[in-house]
Amino acid sequence: MYRTLDDIDVKGQRVLLRVDLNVPMAGSMVSDSTRLTKAAPTILELMKRGARVIILSHFGRPNGVVKESMSLKPISDVLGSIIGRQVSFSSSSIGSAAETAVNSLASGEVLVLENLRFHAEEENNDPDFARTLAQLGDIYVNDAFSVSHRSHASTEQLAHLLPSAVGRQLDLELSTLSIALEKPKRPVMAVVGGAKVSTKLDVLLNLIEKVDSLVIGGAMANTFLFAKGFEIGASLHEPNLLSTAQNIMEKADRIKCNIMLPTDVVTSSKLELGAKSKVYKVESVPHKKMILDLGPETVFNIKKSLFECKTILWNGPLGAFEIPPFDEGTVTLAKEVGKLTIDGQLVSVAGGGDTIAALNKAK
């Protein structure tokens, strides 16, 4: 069993709080602040209890390079507005500048350190980098459910270096997920989307052992369709993972997990707002077209399956949802899931920043 905030004394302590500030942006503006709002209760509680709160997070994929466009500064400003408190910011996450910022922090104050992924050591789970971070704190609190599956320095190594606990949001997410996975109401459906199989390989392999049906959408579905021998035109896919996709489908077939792939798709020659689009069956996607969303037949089939389900786990958008009209499949299904959940016919668990943003569009 894990420890929570109820099990630790934080007064006067430097608390390294790992949250997920990796929010969707429209230019330099935060377009969906759901993750910031969910992080607020833990931050405010720690401040009220007299902790010196040092926030750790990543933003985007800078690949170990400092990129001004991926600074956490504008996001920290929005976080301050949400919690109604002044939020200090350090342009470094390690080194003398970070140490000075932490040392100047008084009890009940909060500081955001710069994007951890400006250092390649973060994603490499480098123990020396983790030890450097650990020197900035006395206690480690993880409240970042969406990245807790990653073996990164700030999510895995740090937990072994300092007295650790989970925050309020992570505790809630774990409790909800436990109910959904350990003793779920069946049938259980998982909906997994997004761009890459590679980023969700472990998720897919685990889910097929626990759910009755698995819907695969987004650009991820293109890799599976290609692995089944369908032409996918100019669509984004991962050709180096075709055998992996085949193995996942074969394993699902053996253990009687029904994998639902698109039967028709929305295509276009351009990925841009208002681009002309056309629906094709997956057997006849033109050579120069990109698959950018689920087709109406596929959406209808998934909706029909939803009525038979009691529990749904959703991670990732099912099309290029940021750019209309390629958001229609995701939004239509999100509305249906929301309605069934409100009516008490479905227990739904959603995870991932893009997923939350997509579901918010459906409100």
Image: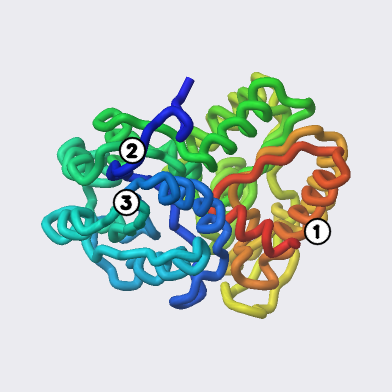
- Is 81 situated above or below 100? below
**Secondary structure of residue under mark 1:** helix
- Mark 2 = which residue? 140
> Disc 2 residue type?
Tyr
Of residues 297 and 97, the one nearer the viewer is 97
- To which residue does mark 1 refer? 296
Look at discs 3 and 1 and give the one toward the viewer: 3
Image x and y of residue 210, in percent: 64, 24
Identify which amino acid the numbered label 1 is placed on.
Pro
Q: Given this view, does label 3 or label 2 mark the residue nearer the observer?
A: 3
Instruction: Classify mark 3: residues with Cα within 10 Å, few (<14), some (14-19) or many (20+).
Output: some
Q: Quadrant of the C terminus?
A: bottom right
Return the residue nearer the eye: 103 or 128.
103
Q: Is 190 displayed left or right of 8 in the figure?
A: right
> Counting residues from the N terminus, which is met first, the one under dot 1 or under dot 2?
2
Q: Amino acid at mark 3?
A: Ser
